[in-house]
Image: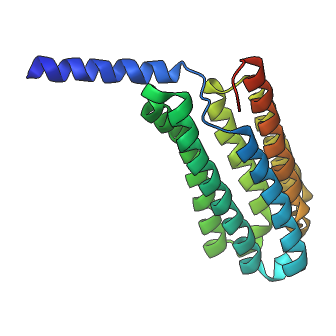
Amino acid sequence: MNDLNKALGDIGDIRRQMARTTEFRGYGPATLATTGVIAIVAASIQGWRVPNPAGNISNYLSVWIWTAVLCAGLTGVQMYTRTRRMHSGMSQEMLHMAVEQFLPSIGAGLLITMVLLRNVPSALWMLPGIWQVVFSLGVFSSCRFLPRPMLAAGAWYLLTGLYCIGLGDSRALSPWCMGVPFGAGQLLVAGILLFSTREAGDEN
């Protein structure tokens, strides 16, 4: 029995190692492009419903938190079905690896938001920039199993986040300080994946 358990453990280790050295193809270009469009729509909604975000931070957060939940749900469902199709036998390991790479940045962004909201409300204008910088770290962390040009997307989110922080005041709460970085950023990610997919001869 011990030999069987050891053999199963060795097989599991081999599968995890293979997952770490295999390019992840669970992200669908069309779905990620859709999340970029959703970000632009959310920015339009903010401009219409929350004209003074600095004075109505709860509604501002509501717009963008629900946008994040919608995009994450859409991406998660599509990633699950696509990974099962593209990676078949290693789908579980590949999904686990993808989530493992991005989860720390998502958790950090959520915790920073909670701390600023509760303890430093005067610094809430920094959230758009912080969210983008934290998201860039998730992208950079995932780059080792994504196409190399994905580094450009990580750099985009980092630079736009630093720009927003550099504004130094509530101008960073403008709808387009979120809509443009995430809209264009997700479209860039989708374009990179689409180009890589066509180059590899795979179907989207």
Asked whether residue 50 is in view, the answer is: no
77, 144: nearer the viewer: 77
Q: Residue furthest left?
A: 1
Asked whether residue 37 is in view, the answer is: yes
Image coordinates for residue 77, horizontal then vertical, percent = 57, 50
Image coordinates for residue 44, horizontal then vertical, percent = 89, 68
140, 43: nearer the viewer: 43
115, 145: nearer the viewer: 145
Image quadrant assignment for residue 63:
bottom right
Q: In this view, does 130 lie to the left or right of 9?
A: right
Q: Which residue lies furthest to the bottom in this view?
A: 55
Q: Which residue lies furthest to the front in this view?
A: 203
User: Which residue is drawn at the image coordinates 72% and 18% (left, top)?
Assistant: 201
Image quadrant assignment for residue 74:
bottom right
Image coordinates for residue 24, horizontal then vertical, percent = 59, 28
Q: How is the image coloured?
A: rainbow
User: Which residue is drawn at the image coordinates 79% and 42% (left, top)?
Assistant: 158
178, 94: nearer the viewer: 94
Image coordinates for residue 116, horizontal then vertical, percent = 66, 68
